[in-house]
Image (cartoon, helix red, strand yellow):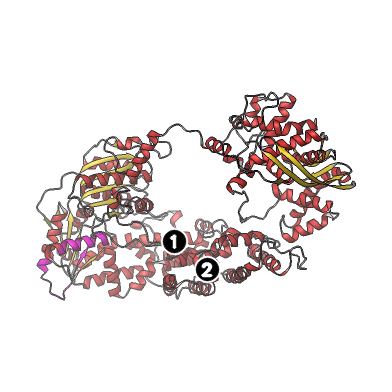
Amino acid sequence: MDEGDFRMAVTAVLGARWGALMDHLVETLHGLALGPFDAARVLVATHETGRLVGQEVAARVGISAGIDYLTPADLTRQLADAAGVHRERGRWLGTPLDLAVQKALDEVADGYPLLRGALEADARRPGRRRATAIRLARLLRSYVELAPELVASWLDGGATGPGGAELPEVAAWQPELMRAAVARLELDPLAVLAAVGDAAGRDTTPTMLVGIDHVSASELRVIESLASRREVRLIQKAGTPGAHWAASLATRTLQLPGDEAPAPLVALHDSHGEARQVEVLRDELTRLFAADPTLEPRDVVVVCPQPERFAPLLDAAFAPGVRGASHPGRSLRVHSVGLTPPNPLVLLLVDLMRLGGSRATANGLVELLLRPPIAHRWRLTDRATMVELIGGAGVRWGMDAAHRAQFGLGDVSQNTWIRGLDRLLVGLAVAPGEDAGVGLSGTEVVTASDMDTVGSLCEIVSRLRLLVAGTAAPATIPGWVARCRAALDSLVGLPRTEEWQLTAAARALTRLETNHAADDTTLTRHEFSLLLADAAAGYRRRPAAGNGSLAVVPLGELPHVEFRVVALLGVTDDAVPGRAGAPADCLDLAEDMPDPRAQRREQLLSHARSAERLLIVRQARSERTNGPSALPVAVDWLLERVGTTPEPRQHPPTATSAGNFVTEPSFDSAAYAGALARRRRQPLPRRHERRRAEARSRPVGAIPAQVSLTQLARFLADPARAFLQSAAGINFRQPPELTDDIPLETRGLDRWGIVNNLLDAWKSGLSGESVEVELRQRELHPPLEVGRLAFQAARTDAAALWACAQQDWDAELTEHAISLSVEAPGLGTLRLVDEVRTRGGTAVTVSASTGEEQVIRPWLESLALAAAGHTAPARLHRLERDFGQLKPRSQDFAPTGPEEALAHLGVITGAYILGQQRLLAVPAAAALAYARDVHQGAFNKAEWAGPFRSYHKKWSWPGPSWTLFFDSDVSELFKDPPLPQDPPLPQDPGTHPSAFASWALALYTPLVRTQS
């Protein structure tokens, strides 16, 4: 049938208002005189539009039975099914073409260096080959859609561009790739299109089209084919892109009576970030509902170009709240937006398939095992226990040495999962400290109560190792589906209420298997995991239009449907106009190539012209600085097309700002309460000062009956920590943590641990080699030669210190029992009970630590000995950091007279009594430095001011307990005035009186004197 014949069957009907279009549609349906078993179809832009059109028809004639409301894509699928090419069309539009292109690239790339370079293996991009195939498959689909004549020439062996022009060198590979992909897929896409067109030509169902602005080239050909048998009526809004293409297709045009809708009343609101924009939108919608009692939620639509981006904010802002205690906007029926969540079980499968290509880190695999589908089956319910066991077993990364081989570390089995599990099993079977004879020591964190958990871990990890080995080789998609089913059978179990996940996962796997049953293309595990991730993606929620709720729709949804209020939210330059639509590497198709940027602008204009009131909320200021930000160009373009220049209303940056409740006040009662509280707020000390003041002013209760030197030394080393533990039950033990990296050097606590272990061994008469063997069995230091060198470096430091201390340590040992009655001034008496050992008449301490507080213990021992009548000096051997190097240092403490020693023990025990119940802000390192400065007359105020973490300051590195009470500056030490129970200043403090100066001088001036 020639072009003139089918044009006679197309009628374009143009109207100015949506209501007029609906009236004409009803009139046309009435004129069809459909019987009870007859059918008709109405083509609409989207499913939500179809739902509203159906309601409009039913409202006018009382019934809408027998009428299908379809999108052009729905119609094309139905026709493909009728033509028997539904599967072929699905293969062309789906992943089978992606895989065919991927395979075809291997065949074609050798002849084209440019293409070959794009496919070269890259360890940093394991999905590069598949990503390239998907992009090029999209390119081939666009050619079939937009330039079928060009594709026909290529399939016939041609190699020219559009209009017979010569192809540029960079695109010379495209014809050959098209032919290779079609051959691999074993279908002709043009034949599929022709079959769909033939089915449309045979279709006799009355068809009408309403309000569709944009149709693809193939959809337009379907409409033409439908018109060859029966009239197709195109009912379009005048002045829109839909009216333009309908008029160009039709030979008969009807113009419906009626004037155009007046320009909408526009309100423009300038706000800040996305969260604040949603708050402003909620307030302004509430204001409109409050001003017009006839306005209903169904009369309002919120158009958001990227609804998924705003979905969490909208859901939170409009979630129902407690009546009378929240924003009245929460009572609006706003339909939830965004995508449905993906199937968690399919996401788990994706991660399982990727496991072999990952490092299988301790953190990553623990989180995987605690995912509900695995945790439920294996009863892994306690995350803390899991972390403690895995961390204590020394697991870092890698299933085993074979798994590490792909990372070039196949000779390093230390800290793998299999070694960690062996340590757990040895810990269950062998007593701590015993040699199991297997080259590994058992971990001390495991107990008999952990047996079930350890058994589950061993079984799961063994199955995961099989999975990793089984997924190493590439396979076809049916092969991968079989591997996925095996993984589900061996690892997963769900409660009855969650078994739908298994059904949905099985359905997704079956769909993949069916669609690629005859495809021999092999995929790596990474490529298949990407394919599986696509299958797990969520879907848009079911249409909500027409159910009485306030709809939130993306751009282009419900085109030309008139609403009393249209709100525009999130119109930004990256969304409108957004990116251009031509695929990469696409040839110049001239006017055949659609312009999605123009389409988005026209969709925005369509929404604006369908409103009585247009409410625009845009970002005009930064949510961080409140400074001006670039305004979205699309909003300015829209206002120009609508023909209005509203004055934007500026909104304050937060809901609790006072300006939010002056003119047109916000409806947010909670924010109003916050604004009032802010206005009434009195200047308060900074939180660290408040916290410190409260902790220092606590009452003093009963005193302890006795105390030991160990308790006194621990208290003086960190009074804040002691106070928090005693008064609040807060301890600073770090919870078990997992580490994913194998250390390549020993630093900090790790190096200190080696030095300390060596010193303990030498003190006990053991060799250093026994320490190295124990560390290797516990896998606590770097592996192989790196570990040996690290141990030797730590041993060098320990040996240097031991060389200075050994003679003192090996001297004659004498044990002295200490039992003293000590009077704490103004507080009471308590007993000091302990045991002190002297070696050659000196209290000797050997410490691997570098902290200045190490001087406290030997000095206390010397005081206790003197007070007990055993006058003796003390000596400390320790390491000291000197420009990054550790060097041994010996410090001597002269003996003190008995009466002076007992008196000073009274001051120390008094500090201990007070410090158990209130804060004594006297950190040891800072107090010792201050006491030395004052004693030597060298106090320099500049050195006691400035930020922490500076090596030039006297208090450089406050511990975690002190950061709760001091903010950022060393000078804060001197801000607290002395309290009545604080000791008087014994000498000129060098600065104004403070509690810190009082306690620092009272506690540590005697220590400084013993070192002078």
Label 2: few (<14), some or many (≥20) within 10 Å?
many
Q: Residue 35 in magenta?
A: yes
Q: Quadrant of residue 649?
A: top left
Q: Return the residue nearer the eye: 521 or 540.
A: 540
Circle 2 — which element? helix
**Reading the chain from its start, which is encountered first: label 2 or label 1?**
1
Q: Residue 281 in the image: state x and y as whole percent.
A: 30, 45
Figure disc tally = 2
**Residue for badge 1:** 134
In the rendered structure, the answer to whether residue 907 lies left or right of residue 246 reads right
What's drawn in magenta, residue-wise?
29-58
Q: Position of residue 39 (x, y in %)?
A: 18, 72
In depth, the one of 352 and 601 nearer the eye is: 352
Residue 271 percent across, percent down from the top left: 34, 40
| Location of residue 32 by image quarter | bottom left
Kind of residue indicated by mark 1: Ile
Q: For the C terminus, give its image quadrant.
A: top right
The amino acid type found where label 2 is placed reads Ile
Q: In percent of the image, x 38 and y 34: which residue is there?
A: 679
User: Residue at the spot x=76%, y=55% of the render?
Assistant: 785
Mark 2 and mark 1 residues within 8 Å of each other at the beta carbon: no
Q: Nearer the viewer, residue 311 or 664?
A: 664
Vertical arrangement, residue 877 with respect to residue 189, above or below = above
Camera sees residue 527: yes
Residue for badge 2? 374
Q: Could you tell me which quadrant the N terminus lies in?
A: bottom left
Identify the image quadrant of residue 618.
top left
Give left or right: position of 804 versus 307: right
| Residue 249 among those drawn in magenta | no
When the figure is inspected, residue 487 is found, relative to residue 669, above or below; the finding is below
Image-based side of 865 in relation to 69, left or right: right
SS class, disc 1: helix
